[in-house]
């Protein structure tokens, strides 16, 4: 693969105008297809599980009870100033508003609160029900706004009108502001990382190309495939984050090559061949994990997984084709300026910062070669003395001569400290960047570091043991929204169960007396615990079915409601024996219960597959047993801690006000499995980019601790920037009004932050420092049977390599 990507990068660099034209054409084609065949107006936010009991009942209701088969809305009338809704003037105003509501678009039936007896005990609140024959996703874009306008006439002094209900639930989320915030923060981080606005802008531009192609392409399919607004937002979120990160890894390698004198064309080709190989590997892991969501069997989740996988796949294609073309347009302008901080930093990483220790005895090892240089000149210049002798003496000799540079300053410090300690494990000094200094700190006492990380993440993960899963409802909508006000008012005045009634479909075709059978079914259900009231059965004599509305005592997301649904289903055998009728439980609340049950049953197998896949992939990449096991353990720690943080914020309410969470509620049923899929792929990104440089250094020097520090020096800064960018992009979506999207954004932002800094930048080096040589051990019999993936492009050969030691010229010396 590295050789193929090397050729691809060179081709894209040389044919950059054609490559740019090709991607512009792809974006234009996606826009045209979206305009012609799809668009945001056709997004489908319906939850369903084909083959589940609740879905089978809903499908039958489309023919037997069409006015009950679609979504519904609630109109909540609240009398104020000491008045009651039953007062003649107020009741007349309510009836007039209901007549107007009946003429709103797509309304099939309006049920008056005076007929349904849905009036609060104190007479201040009345709830009317508006029924549609279509699901929420099939409502016209202005249908709900027209309904609000129709009843607005009743909203006068002495009465308040609020419209809510399941028709408003899971409404499309708008994320345009989030896009701008995420891109802006990413650009700032990139500018600080590279010290160049031009260099920083390239990853942002290429990421926008990929996101535009993915999102417009997905929207072009909405005319034929069900795609939710959350799937669109997730694809946008992940596509933008990985698009910037993948380009960052390649651009940083390209700039490193340029700083060491390589020609732009060869530099771009080599960057794509090396860093691009890791990008392809990391991207494919995300694609595999996201595509794996299709096996759960929930269309809503399938669309989310495929949309996100498509966005990541396009991001990989952009990084390996369009990016080298843009690097060709930039040419030598990306080379750090002579004497600049960026140039000194890049040359320090490639030169003075390089671990040249083979045995751990001296900076140049047993060979006695000079520390810096491809010229074989001495570091100290005209003294003619080697910096490190064959006996491994200190760099700053007993004569006190300076190690390097014509400035007369010591390489390490003015005190003349040794560049390499007596253990041969330190290369310290000006060449050590912040990431390397952090790695040195955490590897100084690796066992203590591991205990601290596990204890901290374990404490953060503790709330996850009490996690409640459910689909979001209007109880977690923004506090100022009409549907949230209606939800709270109904729960307060009529009981929480009125916000999520159950529908029981009874088939009485085998009963001797269908009417009596339906009544006995209703009576049996009414005797169950947690039932507030049972409505009169609505019969369809033609199909010998009856529909019974059951109002629970508890809220839709309350565990007691789930228990009631399961109790009715568990009693179906007794109901059949006593009445001859078969029953099915459906409605939005029952659908939520079925979705949660389906996801819970899939969570453990999916986790096992993800962990197993990570072990296999990392075994192939690093040819080690410890590295995959360590990565899997770290991944589980970060997942558990992230879920604990989500529960703490959204379910327990800790610090929720900081991100606009004004009420607590259950965690979205989709969140754990989405988090597993996404975070798995992103964790593999950082694992590959960081540990691959460690393995490369270990194979070259044989010094396990020095290899850990070398990995930090080469990749730590870039991985840190990538994690901050990805966290910022995800966090920008916390401004969304969609509870589900807000939870996903928080989980991904927290997950990336914890995984990158607590696991990859702390836990990983501590484990490798503790296990030392054993970390890179693999049984010989297994090593012979495993294919060598060559992620770092070692097979490209020495002709394509960058000198590991480059002398500082007078113009670049600090």
Image (cartoon, rainbow, N blue to C red):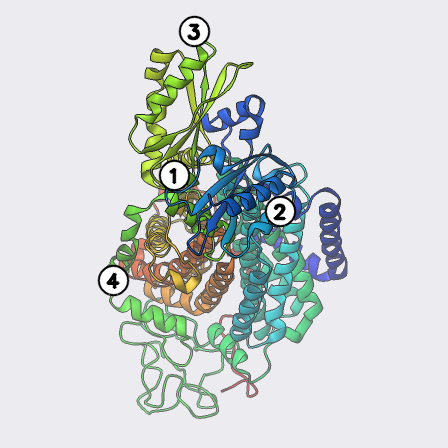
| Residue, disc 1 | 497
Marks 3 and 1, how far apart at CA:
33 Å
- Earlier sequence position, callout 4 versus callout 2: 2
Q: Nearer the viewer, mark 3 or mark 4?
A: 3
Query: Is residue 170 at least partly visible in the picture?
Result: no
Mark 3, secondary structure of its residue:
loop
- Earlier sequence position, callout 4 versus callout 1: 4
Marks 4 and 2, how far apart at CA:
61 Å
Residue at 65 percent of width and 42 percent of height: 140
Tell which of 275 and 230 is nearer to you. Answer: 230
Residue at 59 percent of width and 43 percent of height: 96
* Residue 142 position within the rendered picture, expressed as x and y whole percent measured from the top left: 65, 47
Q: Are marks 3 and 2 in contact (CB under 8 Å)?
A: no
Q: Nearer the viewer, mark 4 or mark 1?
A: 1
| Residue, disc 2 | 150
Q: Would you call the spot at circle 1 few (<14 residues within 10 Å), some (14-19), or many (20 or more)? A: many
* Residue 181 position within the rendered picture, expressed as x and y whole percent measured from the top left: 55, 66
Residue at 66 percent of width and 46 percent of height: 41
Indicate whether 556 appears above or below 385.
above
- Earlier sequence position, callout 3 versus callout 4: 4
Mark 1, secondary structure of its residue:
helix
Query: Is residue 573 at least partly visible in the picture?
Result: yes
Circle number at residue 512: 3
Indicate whether 368 appears above or below 500.
below
Mark 2, secondary structure of its residue:
helix
| Residue, disc 4 | 452
Q: Are marks 2 and 1 in contact (CB under 8 Å)?
A: no
Circle number at residue 576: none
Residue at 31 percent of width and 49 percent of height: 464
């Amino acid at each position: 693969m590295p050789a193929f990507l090397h050729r691809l990068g060179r081709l894209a660099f040389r044919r950059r105008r054609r490559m740019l034209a090709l991607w512009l054409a792809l974006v234009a084609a996606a826009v045209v297809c979206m305009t012609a065949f799809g668009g945001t107006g056709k997004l489908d936010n319906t939850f369903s599980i084909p083959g589940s009991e609740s879905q089978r009942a809903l499908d039958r209701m489309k023919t037997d009870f069409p006015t009950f088969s679609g979504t519904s809305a609630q109109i909540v009338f609240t009398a104020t100033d000491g008045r009651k809704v039953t007062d003649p003037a107020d009741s007349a105003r309510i009836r007039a508003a209901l007549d107007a509501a009946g003429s709103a678009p797509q309304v099939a039936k309006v049920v008056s609160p005076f007929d349904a007896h849905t009036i609060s005990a104190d007479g201040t609140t009345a709830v009317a029900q508006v029924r549609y024959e279509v699901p929420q996703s099939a409502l016209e874009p202005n249908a709900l706004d027209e309904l609000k306008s129709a009843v607005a006439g009743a909203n006068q002094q002495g009465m308040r009108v609020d419209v809510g209900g399941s028709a408003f639930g899971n409404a499309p989320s708008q994320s345009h502001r989030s896009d701008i915030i995420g891109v802006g923060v990413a650009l700032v981080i990139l500018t600080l990382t590279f010290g160049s606005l031009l260099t920083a802008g390239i990853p942002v531009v290429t990421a926008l190309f990929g996101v535009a192609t993915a999102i417009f392409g997905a929207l072009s399919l909405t005319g034929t495939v069900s795609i939710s607004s959350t799937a669109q937002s997730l694809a946008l979120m992940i596509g933008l984050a990985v698009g910037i990160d993948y380009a960052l890894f390649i651009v940083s390698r390209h700039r490193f090559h340029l700083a060491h004198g390589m020609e732009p064309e060869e530099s771009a080709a080599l960057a794509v061949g090396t860093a691009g190989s890791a990008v392809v590997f990391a991207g494919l892991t995300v694609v595999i994990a996201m595509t794996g969501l299709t096996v759960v069997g929930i269309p809503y989740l399938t669309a989310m997984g495929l949309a996100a996988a498509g966005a990541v796949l396009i991001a990989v294609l952009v990084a390996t084709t369009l990016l080298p073309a843009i690097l060709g347009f930039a040419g030598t302008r990306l080379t750090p300026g002579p004497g600049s901080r960026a140039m000194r930093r890049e040359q320090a990483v490639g030169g003075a910062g390089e671990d040249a220790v083979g045995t751990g005895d001296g900076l140049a090892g047993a060979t006695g070669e000079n520390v810096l240089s491809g010229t074989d000149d001495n570091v100290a210049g005209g003294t003619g003395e080697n910096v490190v002798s064959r006996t491994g003496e200190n760099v700053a000799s007993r004569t006190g001569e300076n190690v390097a540079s014509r400035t007369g300053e010591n390489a390490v410090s003015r005190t003349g400290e040794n560049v390499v300690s007596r253990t041969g494990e330190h290369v310290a000094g000006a060449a050590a960047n912040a990431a390397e200094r952090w790695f040195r700190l955490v590897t100084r006492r690796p066992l203590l570091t591991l205990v601290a990380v596990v204890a901290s993440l374990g404490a953060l993960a503790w709330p996850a043991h009490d996690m409640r899963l459910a689909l979001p409802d209007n109880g977690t909508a923004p506090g100022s929204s009409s549907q949230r006000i209606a939800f709270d008012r109904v729960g307060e005045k009529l009981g929480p169960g009125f916000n999520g009634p159950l529908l029981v479909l009874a088939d009485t075709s085998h009963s001797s007396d269908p009417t009596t059978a339906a009544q006995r079914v209703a009576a049996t259900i009414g005797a169950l615990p947690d039932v507030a009231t049972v409505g009169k059965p609505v019969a369809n004599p033609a199909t010998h079915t009856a529909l019974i509305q059951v109002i629970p005592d508890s809220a839709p997301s309350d565990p007691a409601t789930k228990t009631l649904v399961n109790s009715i289903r568990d009693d179906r055998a007794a109901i059949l024996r006593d009445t001859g009728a078969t029953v099915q439980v459906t409605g939005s609340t029952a659908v939520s219960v079925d979705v949660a049950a389906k996801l819970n049953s899939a969570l453990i197998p999916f986790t096992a597959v993800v962990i197993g896949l990570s072990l296999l992939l990392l075994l192939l990449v690093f040819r080690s047993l410890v590295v995959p096991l360590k990565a899997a353990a770290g991944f589980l720690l970060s997942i558990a801690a992230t879920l604990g943080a989500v529960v703490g914020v959204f379910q327990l309410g800790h610090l929720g006000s900081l991100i606009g969470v004004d009420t607590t509620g259950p965690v979205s049923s989709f969140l754990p499995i989405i988090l597993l899929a996404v975070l798995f792929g992103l964790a593999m990104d950082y694992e590959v980019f960081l540990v691959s440089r460690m393995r490369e250094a270990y194979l070259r020097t044989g010094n396990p601790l020095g290899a850990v520090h070398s990995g930090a020096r080469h990749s730590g800064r870039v991985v840190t920037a990538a994690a901050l960018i990805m966290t910022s992009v995800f966090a920008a979506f916390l401004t969304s009004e969609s509870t589900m999207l807000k939870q996903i954004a928080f989980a991904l932002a927290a997950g990336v932050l914890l995984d990158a800094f607590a696991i990859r930048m702390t836990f990983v080096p501590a484990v490798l420092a503790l296990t030392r040589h054993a970390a890179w051990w693999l049984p010989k019999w297994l090593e012979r049977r495993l294919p060598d993936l060559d992620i770092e492009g070692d097979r490209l050969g020495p002709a394509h390599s960058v000198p590991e030691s480059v002398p500082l010229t007078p113009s670049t010396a600090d």
